[in-house]
Image: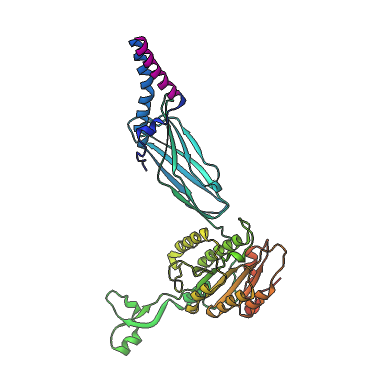
Amino acid sequence: MTAEPERAVRQALGGLTTRGRSFLAAGLAAGICSYVLGQPDLLRVGLLLAGLPLVCVLALYRTRYRVASTRRLSPSRVPAMSEARVLLRVENVSRLPTGLLMLQDRVPYVLGPRPRFVLDRVEPGGHREVAYRVRSDLRGRYPLGPLQLQLADPFGMCELTRSFTTADTLTVVPRTEPLPGVRLAGEASGYGDSGYRALALAGADDVIPRGYRYGDDLRRVHWRSTAKYGELMVRREEQPHRARCTVLLDTRRAAFHGAGPDSSFEWAVTGAASVAVHMLERGYAVRLLTDSGSCVPGPDGATAFGGSGAESSETAGLLLDALAVVDHSEASGFSAAHEVLRGGNEGLVVAFLGELDEEQAAAVARMRQRTGGAVAFVLDGREDGAWATDPLRTLREAGWTALPVRTGDQLADLWRRADGSASPGGTGAGR
């Protein structure tokens, strides 16, 4: 990018250093003395002293708008507690060499101190590259830039600071934990990996025939239907039914206690990200649903599932980007999420829930009627260690596999406890 001339020459004069101001003052004083004393030689000295800083200001003012910079992030999406590398490239696109260049990139406080670099000299048409690393323990979207550039002339008469206009964004997504491959309690047959194995044995062709079209493979001709209808019929190619999984994340502010990367809400966000990525790897079409009814991907919460075939990586990116910026809601219940699930059988639902009262637990329990299987991880971040068992019992009686989550619990261990073979009837094991 190239900077635009936004400052006037008068503002450029404000960049005079102490040395430049001293030369200018000495030149003016020499000019006044030459007039008073009638010494023309002293006037020439005064013009030289006063003209040098002005020439430096003019040259620096013209040169500074011919410096270009680019920024490259590697990667632009990084998990929390991991580093990203930022590469800055500064290019001199003018015909004159630059003087001393001092660079400072603006970064949010959570990413670390502002990086500063000094470039001695950049020849005409030349460039310099510098790099630094950023790291954040908190998920979110963080702006990087704009880059600030301080220019100085070779004589040290003037220093001008300017900012480029372009900034980039670093997305810090929640960390994901590897999960073991288990069969979840209540998971219907034909879902996920088992569904694809069944299709591999039975074949992907649907026996419902259709009329022959020019270009169809003759090996797909269905001779029995051809004889029945008196015209050439071929087997219809149908896309196999894809298993669905909805990851429900409770974002109610009143349901969680504490703040920071070790809080219960951040545990729930990390768990939702881990389950979403895990189910995509198992071949599920996955969506993210919150208590407020917002759904990712797509605007249509009732039908928007992502992750078919080659779209799995794109869907994973959309889900992680959404979880990077998800925040607490002011909702008090789950009515909006229940409306989204009223469209019919939504497949498997994996919920990460905060503290529940009886009314909220009953609302979540009713969601089980619209699902093929339901697993709930219920968090309680209260410091007294007390646990409300009635909401867990309500969920289990409705058919949920409800597991309590306490401080220090590992998601992989809880995921194994949700194994349908380990907890018959889908009621979930308690501690």
Question: Magenta stretch containing residue 21, yes or no?
Answer: yes
Residue found at x 36% / y 32%: 10
The magenta stretch spans residue 201: no
Which image quarter: residue 80? Answer: bottom right
Q: Position of residue 103 (x, y in %)?
A: 46, 37
On-image quarter of the C terminus: bottom right
Residue 18 spot, x, y in % from top left: 46, 25
Q: Is residue 150 above or below residue 144?
A: above
Looking at the image, residue 154 lies above or below residue 229: above
Specify the farthest residue to the bottom. Answer: 228
Query: Which sits in the foreground, 218 or 186?
Result: 186
Q: Residue at x 35, y 36 (%)?
A: 65
Residue located at (68% from left, 73% from top): 429
Vertical placement of residue 6 versus 228, above or below: above
Q: Which residues are magenta?
A: 19-38
Q: Position of residue 38 (x, y in %)?
A: 34, 9
Q: Which quadrant of the figure has residue 391?
A: bottom right
222, 127: nearer the viewer: 127
Residue 89 visible to the viewer: yes
Which residue is rendered at x = 47% and y = 76% of the image?
199
- Whether residue 422 is visible here, answered yes or no, is no
Which residue is more in the foreground, 366 or 345? 366
- Kindly give the residue lying farthest to the front in the view shown: 36
The quadrant of the rendering that contains the N terminus is top left
- Looking at the image, the residue that sits furthest to the left is 214
Observer-nearest of 98 and 201: 98
Does 393 appear above or below 170? below
Q: Is residue 171 left or right of residue 266?
A: left
Q: Main secondary structure of the magenta part?
A: helix
Residue 365 x, y percent position in the rendering: 59, 77
